[in-house]
Amino acid sequence: MKSFATTTLLLFTFTAVSFAEPPVTFERQGDQITVKIGDAPFAVYNTSKELPKPFFSPVRDPNGTIISRPIENPEDHKHHKGIWVSIDEVNDIKFWAEAGKIENVSVAFHDSGDDGPSSLLVVNHWQGEDGKPVVIETTTIGVFPNRLMTYDIVFTPVAGPVTFGDTKEGLLGFRMINSMREKEGGKVANADGKRGTAECWGQQSAWVDYYGEAEGKIVGVTLMDHPGNFRPSRYHVRDYGLFSISPFGEKAYTKGASGAEPVVVEKGESLRLRYGLYIHNGDTLEGQVAEAYKQFLSAAK
């Protein structure tokens, strides 16, 4: 067992990337917040309390094509919804599988204009069977004009210690349209030169890029780990289009080669995690993934 304390909730400090790029803005309509880059919609954050968790859907690539799998009538894994944050085995509650409810409490947003990326400050309550929060998630989501999203996630227990168990089901996830997935000809590569889902699944790496065809054009999604997290994260990357990153699951991701290392966060402490998600045109090289990772590290201080 390990315990990790964060005495101060730290949020991102951002710097501008280009004065020529269009601004990122937000428009609230009821329980939905639309993220726009210039005049074009990028993603919609869904926060209704009727939902099992908040999530971004639809999500569009730089060409305006929706690349997140539709949430209506999914062929499998109905809990895979656009871009989301959840994980199983939090005090034995399976939030990833939507057996536990994650309720959005508030969303504040800041339109940066020319000063840097715009950001959402999200507060979500991860509830127990009694409907009361077991842990509070406070996440700052930065959105850059080039479709780099930065996640600064802080988990804070409410009434007592919270245990994050050993599982492959988590934490920051994306479910892509079928035409992009490896089963349909999509490609996967990580920062260390590994290729394909079989080589990249469960591995530690600075980033993993997953690209494929969307309406006749090649587009990709990159997940990025931050070296300041308490341990290197691993990637749950599948040929059917699931793509996620998590630091919880040393035994699950190594298929038993390493022992389970559950994480306990005591009351009065907090656990901070930082990740990047980048949506780009072209393959890994054309999409300048390595450069975007440097941008992520510069932003996520």
Image: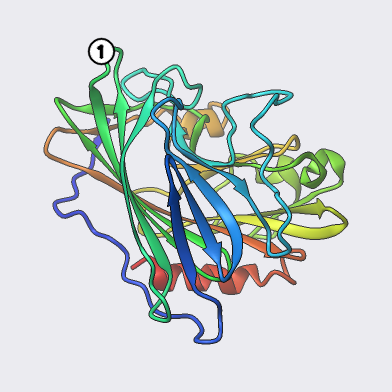
Whole-percent x and y of residue 225?
A: 48, 55
Judge whether 286 appears above or below 139 on screen: below
What residue sits 16% from the left and 55% below the top? 8
In the figure, residue 49 lies in which quadrant?
A: top left
Q: Outermost residue, bottom direction?
A: 19
Q: What colour-coding does the image apply?
A: rainbow
Whole-percent x and y of residue 168?
A: 52, 30
The quadrant of the rendering that contains the C terminus is bottom left
Residues 146 and 256: in front is 146
The quadrant of the rendering that contains the N terminus is top left
Q: Outermost residue, top direction?
A: 129
How crowded pointer 1 is (Cα within 10 Å; few <14, some 14-19, many 20+) is rated as few
What residue sits 15% from the left and 25% below the top? 160
Residue 234 is left or right of residue 231, and the answer is right
Residue 172 shows in the view:
no
What residue sits 47% from the left and 22% below the top? 98
Q: Outermost residue, front direction?
A: 29
The number of numbered badges drawn on the structure is: 1
What residue sits 52% from the left and 28% below the top? 252
In the figure, residue 136 lies in which quadrant?
A: top left
What kind of element bears circle 1?
loop
Q: Which residue is mark 1?
A: 130
Residue 118 is left or right of residue 136, and the answer is right
Residue 139 is left or right of residue 117, and the answer is left
Whole-percent x and y of residue 52?
A: 45, 25
Judge whether 132 appears above or below 53 on screen: above
Tell me which amino acid carries mark 1: Asp
Whole-percent x and y of residue 278?
A: 58, 60
Residues 31 and 258: in front is 31
Residues 146 and 275: in front is 146
Residue 5 is left or right of residue 224, and the answer is left
